[in-house]
Image (spheres, rainbow, N blue to C red):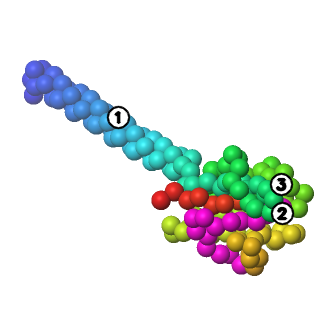
Amino acid sequence: MTVGTNEFALFLLRLASGLLLIAMLAALIIVMWRDYRSATTQLEAARRTYGRLVLLQEIDGVYTPSMTTYPLLPLTSIGRSPTNTILIDDTFASGEHALLALRSGMWWLEDRQSRNGTTLNNIPVTETVIVTDGDIIGIGRMRFKIELEH
């Protein structure tokens, strides 16, 4: 082997290792970009609202919508405890009173073993039930109308 051949072989090795390094960096950037996009999509889905609960006020025995609304998230807890998604100020409500959950495209209402119970359209909730647009949820002395996005 001559000196020129050795230098050419070293040049090819350097070139190959440089290209390999660039390929590895590109692969790393692609993997990080996909992970970032996936995390962003999950975060947007968690923040997305799927409708709202409208607080109803009783006027002369008739419940009418108030200006107070609460966004519905895929998992919406309701009660007096500050750990709930929807914090309500009603002494007849339990700390963790009820749970609204989106499962398989349907909304489910569950009473969380509250002291005074939860109602759906004035019927006591004794097991997890499906709720639909326009249903009225009763928690303590408060009533909420569910308005779902279509």
Number of numbered discs on residues = 3
Q: Secondary structure at mark 1?
A: helix
Distance CA(mark 3)–CA(mark 1): 51 Å
For discs 2 and 3, the disc positioned in front in the rendered view: 2
Dot 3 or dot 1: first in sequence order is 1
User: Which mark is drawn over residue 140?
Assistant: 2
Q: Quadrant of residue 124?
A: bottom right
Q: Which residues are magenta?
A: 127-143
Q: Position of residue 60 (x, y in %)?
A: 81, 59
Distance CA(mark 2)–CA(mark 3): 10 Å
Cβ–Cβ under 8 Å for marks 1 and 2: no
Dot 1 or dot 2: first in sequence order is 1
Q: Residue furthest bottom?
A: 126
Q: Position of residue 116 (x, y in %)?
A: 86, 69
Along the horizontal axis of the image, is 109 left or right of 87? left
Is 132 inside the magenta-drawn segment?
yes
Q: Give the residue type at disc 3.
A: Arg
Residue 81 visible within the image:
no
The 10 Å Cα crowd at callout 1, few under 14, some 14 to 19, many 20 or more, is: few
For discs 1 and 2, the disc positioned in front in the rendered view: 2
Identify the residue under disc 1: 25
- In this rendering, is residue 91 above or below 110? above
Q: Give the residue type at disc 1.
A: Leu
Q: Residue at x 77, y 69 (%)?
A: 118
User: Which mark is drawn over residue 80?
Assistant: 3
Q: Give the residue type at disc 2.
A: Gly
Residue 124 visible within the image:
yes
Distance CA(mark 1)–CA(mark 2): 59 Å
Along the horizontal axis of the image, is 149 left or right of 32? right
The 10 Å Cα crowd at callout 2, few under 14, some 14 to 19, many 20 or more, is: many
Q: Residue at x 57, y 47 (%)?
A: 47
